[in-house]
Image: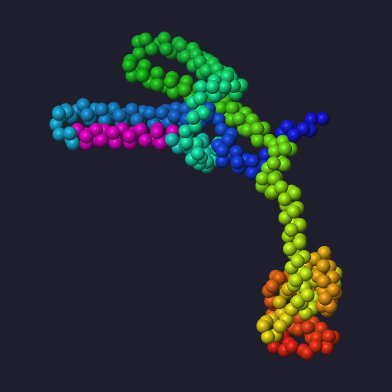
Amino acid sequence: MADSAGDKKHEATEYRRRKAREEGNVARSQDLGSAALLLVGVILLDTTGPGIFQALSEILREQLREPYDWATDPRTWMNRMLLIASKSSLALLPLFGGVLLTSILVHYAQVGSLWLPDKLIPDWNRINPLSGLQRIFSILNASRLGFGLIKIGLVVGLLAMGVWSRWDEILALGGASLETVSQFVWQTMISLCRTVAVALLILSVVDYAIQRWKYEQDLRMTDEEMREEYKMTQGDPHTKARRRRVQRELANQRLNSDVPKADVVVTNPTELAIALKYDPLTMKAPIVLAKGANLVAARIRKIALQHGIPIVERKPLAQALFKQVDIGKPIPVTEYAAVAEVLKYVYQVQGRKLPDLERMAS
């Protein structure tokens, strides 16, 4: 059985995925973007091409129709150039805008929103000749080269089949007019490019699926990587154990110092314990000096017995104080009457002078 630390048998955690993404390690196919741009560009040329050609032809006719002297005022020449550029840009805007929008959408669909300013810093290792040779002769680049040759062969085959299927039409163009030849060439180019673009898009989708699968496999984690990540994110278990031990010691020290100051300990009787103190001269209401459940409650009762602190069983009161009051805080008004009754009982048992409990209970 292969159960070594080198076996990547665990799915990647969210932390590992986030770190990989921050480093720019994402599943992405460059061919998918190129194929999508080619297909959209061909479709846009097919739909907007005649309009673009007509608009550019009209601009050219306007310039040829109005003769002017190039040696005139430079500002006039500059204004004319700006006018030509603006009209040409407006005519080409649907084509370029569609291609740009497609590029953004394809990139976002693959990697989402990703900003990596560190990648803008020049990496001198990228121009290291030795590193370059290693990248060139790597298995990954060899596979990409093979995939590229397959694409080239596919494109050449599709173009050859497209031309061969129209060979009779091509031979029949010998006596056709220039307009007929132009329309045939344009429609043939659009049709062939569309076929090639669809084929390349299918291949690029397959390539993206392979890249995605490889990305998931590379992100998988070994037992050692899981342990290291747990230490990094959650802390060393030994350190956490020491921290918990120190916290328990501090809590015990606080119990040892606070519980002996209490007037009474209210219990559940065994699950909960709440130590209360009331000084009518300095306090408006009794405060909770300490509270705890289970082992902590047992510790509070033990300290109370050692110091002669009365322990009174009041289940509803203990539950209410444990849930509602934090350590060092006064009890809520709703529990004044119940606590006053407990303190009155304790003072009577101890034979002590009763404090002004009426004011607190009122």
Q: Nearer the viewer, residue 258 or 271?
A: 258
What colouring does the structure picture have?
Answer: rainbow
Q: Position of residue 325 (x, y in %)?
A: 71, 72
**What x and y, as percent, mark residue 20?**
60, 38
In the image, residue 152 above or below residue 5 = above
Magenta-drawn stretch, dominant element (helix, strand or loop):
helix
Identify the residue shown where x is 70% and y is 85%. Answer: 280
Q: Is residue 301 visible?
A: no
- Residue 126 visible to an observer of this rendering: yes
Specify whether 78 is left or right of 193: left
Choose between 293 and 102: the one closer to the eye: 293
Say if 81 sits above or below 316 in the image: above
User: At which x and y percent is residue 45?
Assistant: 41, 28
What count of labels does the image hold? 0
Q: Quadrant of the C terminus?
A: bottom right
Q: Is residue 87 magenta?
A: yes
Residue placed at 45% from the left, 37% from the top? 101
Q: Quadrant of residue 60?
A: top left
Asked if residue 46 lies left or right of residue 53, the reply is right
Read off the magenta span: 77-99
Q: Position of residue 313 (x, y in %)?
A: 84, 76
Q: Residue at x 82, y 74 (%)?
A: 304
The residue that appears at 76% across and 81% down in the rendered structure is 339
Quadrant that contains the N terminus: top right
**Horizontal placement of 316 versus 327: left or right?**
right
Tell me, yes or no, whether the highlighted magenta stretch contains residue 115: no
> Looking at the image, which is closer to me, 99 or 107?
107
State the residue in front, 131 or 156.
131
Q: Is residue 91 left or right of residue 206?
A: left
